[in-house]
Amino acid sequence: MRPLARVARFGIVLLQLLVAASATATPAPQVVPVEGLGPMLLVGENGKSARQGYVDSLVQRRLFPGRTEELRAWAARPLQATSLAALRQSGRPLIGIQVSHAGDLVGTPQEKKGRRILARAVERAGGIPVFLPPAGEAAHIAALLGAVDHLLLAGGDDLHPRLYHERIRGSVGINLSRDRYEIDLVKQAVVKKLGITAICRGHQLLNVAFGGRLAQDIIVDGASDHRHATPDFKPVYHTVELAEQSHTAKETGRTRIPIVSLHHQAVIEPGHGLTVVGRSHDGIIEAVEGDSGRIRGYQFHPERSRTPAVRRIFRGMIARAAHAR
């Protein structure tokens, strides 16, 4: 077994003990609305205190220093009361969407656009999107995961190369504290045997959490561009070849699917327990699966696809979440 894989497996075993020890001491998750986005889960005695405590923690640890005043203003806004029980009344599975930037909370409509597209895809497939906070208290992770039926890891900035034992050589927008929190989130989800679907940055996060490595810039490494180099970057459309026996191929009914790509990094060495099941024409790893299909990672963006076959990825995710629930 590779050294990184051994570390990843040891970390998961250790987390099993920590999660069990802390689960009873953490307050319940509260539903906090985020303007232009939807419901978010935060841990606290009530919605107001949960939101204020979360922002205080971010400010004290300077996790998103450029957004401090915006976060404080958000914490002070009036709060429309709702509850986790109310969300569950429909009977549809709750899909916890992990966001990775303060802009998802307090940013412009353009900053939140990607998350809204993802939420709509979840709703179309029959689930209820519930957002999980970017960074926070590691002690609250178990409570947050316990409130959802499936974990959806979304796109965003690059991961810090230190997490896969490399120096910075092409990674941008990195935030080590946030990334460590999300690595912990993934590992605790594995411990809880929660289904995981990971997209773009989430696919890379999943791989690093399992002890894998990333290519920090695929252009430097000789691959073709998987996003147009415009000021705001535009997606590239190409195809992915899927392994015939993969869960994704069976779900979509195809071994070649048209996809929407928007990335400059990629998985270069799959983590322990993850099997490569999809590649693009230039060899970039576009899909991985693990744990009999319960865990899946996609470098591409199925939520942006208009192809019925690709949209089945979300319908399959909702079906698995409903079954697990």
Image: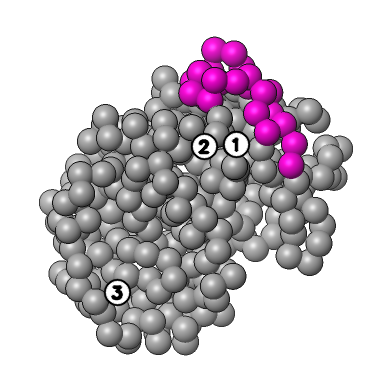
- At mark 3, the secondary structure is helix
Magenta residue check for 58: no
Label 3: few (<14), some (14–19) or many (≥20) C-alpha neighbours in 10 Å: many
Q: Toward the viewer: 215 or 300?
A: 300
Residue 180 visible in rendering: no
Q: Quadrant of the C terminus?
A: top left
Residue at the image position 65 percent from the left and 63 percent from the top: 173
Q: Is residue 101 left or right of residue 265?
A: left
Q: Quadrant of residue 172?
A: bottom right
The magenta stretch spans which residues? 237-258
For badge 1, the amino acid type reads Thr
Q: Toward the viewer: 36 or 63?
A: 36
Residue 50 visible in rendering: yes
**Residue 135 screen position, x and y as percent:** 43, 62
- At mark 2, the secondary structure is helix
Q: Which residue does the numbered mark 3 point to in the structure image?
A: 51
Residue at the image position 45 percent from the left and 38 percent from the top: 314
- At mark 1, the secondary structure is loop
**Residue 227 screen position, x and y as percent:** 76, 50
Residue at the image position 61 percent from the left and 58 percent from the top: 157
Label 1: few (<14), some (14–19) or many (≥20) C-alpha neighbours in 10 Å: few
Q: Are the two marked residues, 2 and 1, in contact with CB atoms closer than 8 angstroms? A: yes
Magenta residue check for 253: yes
For badge 2, the amino acid type reads Arg
Q: CA distance from mark 2 to mark 1?
A: 6 Å
The image's mark for residue 311 is: 2
Residue at the image position 52 percent from the left and 79 percent from the top: 67
Q: Which residue does the numbered mark 1 point to in the structure image?
A: 307
